[in-house]
Amino acid sequence: MWMSVNDTCGKCDKKLLYDMLKVKNGLVQISKCPNGHKKIKSP
Ligand SMILES: [Zn+2]
């Protein structure tokens, strides 16, 4: 299931980008501000 991001950064109002974070068990999907303000782990 691939949901679209509606979330925006509270500081610069940019749309958050999807990113993948490498962890021990594999990959975790996160969304983050392109300017580095915010990083959220997506469930
Ligand atoms: Zn931002």
Image (cartoon, rainbow, N blue to C red):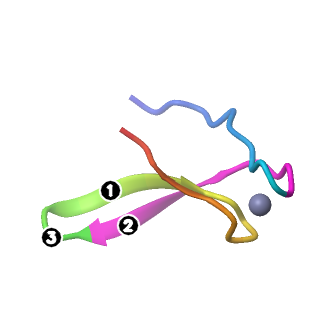
- Taking the spot 63% from the left edge, 60% from the top edge, the residue there is 38
- Taking the spot 75% from the left edge, 70% from the top edge, the residue there is 35
Q: Is residue 36 above or below residue 18?
A: below
- Residue 10, position as x, y percentages in the image: 77, 48
Whether residue 18 appears in magenta in the rendering, the answer is yes
What distance separates the C-alpha of mark 2 from that of mark 1? 5 Å
- The secondary structure type at the circle numbered 3 is loop
Which quadrant would residue 24 be assigned to in this image?
bottom left
Disc nearer the start of the sequence (2/1): 2
Determine the quadrant in which ligand 1 lies: bottom right
- Taking the spot 42% from the left edge, 62% from the top edge, the residue there is 20
- Magenta span: 12-22
Q: Residue 19 versus residue 36: which sits nearer the camera?
A: 36
* Marks 2 and 1 close (CB-CB < 8 Å): yes
Q: Which mark is residue 24?
A: 3
Q: Give amino acid for label 2.
A: Leu
Q: Residue 1 versus residue 35: which sits nearer the camera?
A: 35
Q: Quadrant of the N terminus?
A: top left
What distance separates the C-alpha of mark 1 from that of mark 3? 10 Å
**Residue to which mark 1 is pinned:** 28
Q: Is residue 31 above or below residue 22?
A: above
- Residue 37, position as x, y percentages in the image: 69, 65
